[in-house]
Structures are given as C-alpha cells and as structure tokens.
Image (cartoon, rainbow, N blue to C red):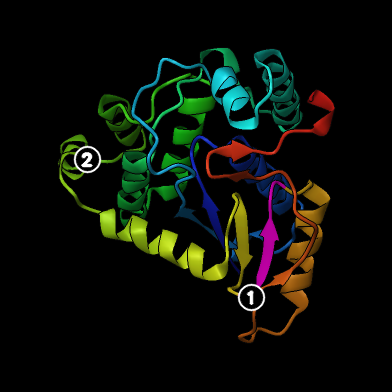
Amino acid sequence: MKIEVWSDFVCPFCYIGKRRLEQALEQFPHRNDVTVVFRSFELDPNAPNETPLTIHEIIAKKYGITVEEAKRANADIGRQAEAVGLTFRFETMKPTNTFDAHRLAQYAKEKGKLDDVVERLFFAYFTESKRMSDRTVLLDIAEAAGLDRSEAEAVLHGGRYTEQVREDEAEAAQLGVRGVPFFVLNGKYALSGAQPVDVFRRALEKVWEEERQDSPLRPLADEGGTCTDGNCSIDESVR
C-alpha cells in the first residue's frame, strides 16, 4: 500500500496528522507493506523569509480576531499536539517561507532519507523554533540525517529540485487539494485533515481489503483540521 501525504512544514495539523497516521500504522498488521511518501505543498508560496510578526499576530490578522483569541486557538492546537506526544512552542515560532525546505526534502527523497528529513524539519520548526528558510538550519538538518553537507549546500544555493516541488503542487491542484494535510491511499482514496487515529486505522483496513483499480478519489471521512493558504482552522469558540 502506498500513502502519499501532501503537507507543509509550518502547518501544525500536518505534523499532528503525521503522528496520528504513524500511530495508526503501529496498530496495522500489514505495516511493513505500507510505504509513506511525503509530497510538497506550500501554504503560502509568497511568505517572506522573515517577519517581525509573531505567529499569534499573523493568525489574528488573517482571521480578524484579537491576539488573545489567536493565542487561545493556538493553545488548543498545542493540546492536540501534546495528545500525540508533540511539543509546539508557539511563543517562539518563526513564521517563514518553506520553499527551500521542500527542495531539501525532494533531495532527501532521492537519497533515501525523506522520512528522517521530514521529521527533523517539522521538529525544528514547531519544537526548536528554528527558521525553515535559514539555509544553515537546513544544512544542519541534512547533515544530521546523514546527507552530504556539501552536496546539500549545492542544492540549496542552486535551483535543483524546484521542478519536483512544482510537480507535486501541480498534482495537488489537479486532485483538488485545497488544504493540508491531504492523504491519498493507493492513488484511489482520499483523507483530508488530521484525522483521529481510529479513522486512519479503519481507512488502512478498508483500502487493504479493496481490490486495487483506478477510480476517482473517494473521501473516507469528513474533513479534519486543515491549513489553507497560510490559514489554519480555528474553533468558533475562540471568537
């Protein structure tokens, strides 16, 4: 079974969804027959590398709410993260552009290091409060994952893997992906959002039992928490 996951490294639900999928796979008896591939998706391709605004201020501005309301919304997301063993440090996060991070991931994919690099990128942003557009940060991640630092530096300072990132994004557009995380199982079934672990588990079981044939994507659950165009779902209760 192949699971393709479109996500962005500054999307909180993408990290939460990643961990929930992993927890579901731990309960799946055919785990060793499942391949997970992460695909590129930029929530905001025009995001600056640096901004004086905090993540709370950015959320408040996007949704037309107060900074305090944004803090409460982020605190709720943080609790969801804690429930799956993650630590989100919203107070020190550095909102940024993720294009180079996606190029690095594409390079890592070619070298067989995709899973390690993806996890390190998420952890660096949400837990270590590192800037994903800082090429020194990206090179440290590449080296820690066992990639050649000099080769990774050549990738980041050139234009390599731009085409691969754009191809992933173009395919997402063709599939009608408007928010991430977005999961495609065997090129046939779709799950949108950071679904609960049991939903992922049931989806894995259903797809495993289904005969494999080409067909349009079929939703396996209602939409979960997603991020779209730089925005993440906010509970109405915080308004």
Furthest residue toward front: 64
Residue 50's mark? none
Vertical comparison of 189 with 3: above or below: below
Residue 73, quarter of picture? top right
Q: Quadrant of the C terminus?
A: top right
The residue indicated by pointer 1 is 188
Relative to the observer, which residue lies in front, 184 or 229?
229
The magenta stretch spans which residues? 188-194
The answer to whether the residues at label 2 and label 1 have Cβ atoms under 8 Å apart is no
Picture coordinates of residue 205, whole percent (x, y): 78, 67
Q: Quadrant of the N terminus?
A: bottom right
Residue appearing at x 77%, y 52% in the figure? 27
Question: What's the residue type where badge 2 is placed?
Answer: Leu
Q: Please determine whether, in this image, residue 199 is positioned above or below residue 237.
A: below
- Image coords of residue 28 (percent x, y): 74, 58
Q: Which residue is mark 2?
A: 156
Disc 1 marks a residue whose amino acid type is Lys
Q: Is residue 236 left or right of residue 82?
A: right
Q: Along the polypeptide, which appears first: circle 2 or circle 1? A: 2
Is 71 positioned to the left or the right of 14 in the image? right
Q: Is residue 224 magenta?
A: no
Q: Position of residue 102 (x, y in %)?
A: 37, 46
Whether residue 93 is situated above or below residue 35 in the rendered picture: above
Q: Nearer the viewer, residue 14 or 213?
A: 14
